[in-house]
Image (spheres, rainbow, N blue to C red):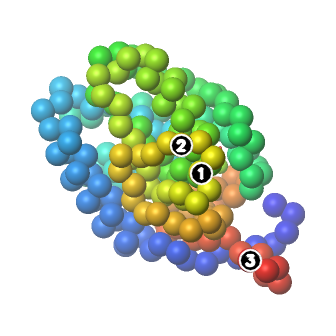
Amino acid sequence: PARPYVIDEMISAKTIAARVEALAKEISQAFAGTDKLVVVGLLRGSFVFIADLVREIDLPVEVDFLEASSYGDAMESSREVRILKDLRGEIAGRDVLVVEDIVDTGFTLSHVLRLLQSREPARLEVCALLDKPSRREVPVRARWTGFEIPDEFVVGYGIDFAQRNRNLPFIGKVRFPGEAS
Ligand code: PRP
Ligand code: MN
Ligand code: MG
């Protein structure tokens, strides 16, 4: 990004860890008895979340990834979701959990769910770490949400601003000093 910015911590690593543990418990109960749960991470934003989440899920798990992109380096959604990398495995007749870092306009998740639903999984649920309901343009909801957040541009714990800050251990909000927020 051209303008300098600062990052204010919004959700600490500790708070995230506690929430991830609770989500994993609920997911383990909801899918109890499954043969094997296919956990699908949406790259790249979900890579940290899925890594922490699957290690707390008490079920046989297969991990797969799908790469979807709509923001690129911009702060605004392009509203055009591109699938850059498809799943390796088959999901027909299987129990599937999609893991997403954040649901904002909803374009990415609804596009991905339509694609995966067409492959006729037995079950298809979503766990999103963050949800910004005030920004929704496409009606879509995750069955599990870590935190509902206000309309702030957030980074960290996998989430980027122009491909930076994904490695922060906490969720922070981006602020441009000197500009009204
Ligand atoms: C971000 C984020 C979500 C999506 C949410 O991905 O990781 O996948 O946007 O926004 P939406 O609800 O408005 O569609 P991005 O396109 O930046 O790709 P990335 O995960 O590789 O950063
Ligand atoms: Mn993403
Ligand atoms: Mg991004």
Q: CA distance from mark 3 to mark 2?
A: 27 Å
Label 3 SS: loop
Q: Which mark is residue 139?
A: 2
From the image, which quarter does the N terminus lie in?
A: bottom right
Q: Which residue is mark 3?
A: 181
Residue 88: horizontal and vertical position, in percent?
46, 21
Mark 1: amino acid = Arg
**In this view, the mark in front (3 or 1):** 1
Q: Which residue is mark 1?
A: 136
Q: Nearer the viewer, residue 68 or 164?
A: 68
Residue 126: horizontal and vertical position, in percent?
39, 41
Q: Quadrant of residue 160?
A: bottom right
Q: Quadrant of residue 58?
A: top left
Q: Are marks 3 and 2 in contact (CB under 8 Å)?
A: no
Q: Are marks 2 and 1 in contact (CB under 8 Å)?
A: yes
Q: Residues within 10 Å of mark 3 (few under 14, many from 20)?
A: few
Seen at 42% across and 31% down, the residue is: 64
Residue 63 visible (yes or no): no
Q: Residue furthest left?
A: 33
Q: Residue furthest bottom?
A: 178
Q: Tell me if the residue at label 1 has its CB under 8 Å from ligand 1.
A: yes
Q: CA distance from mark 3 to mark 1?
A: 20 Å
Q: Quadrant of residue 174?
A: bottom right
Seen at 82% across and 79% down, the residue is: 179
Seen at 48% across and 31% down, the residue is: 113
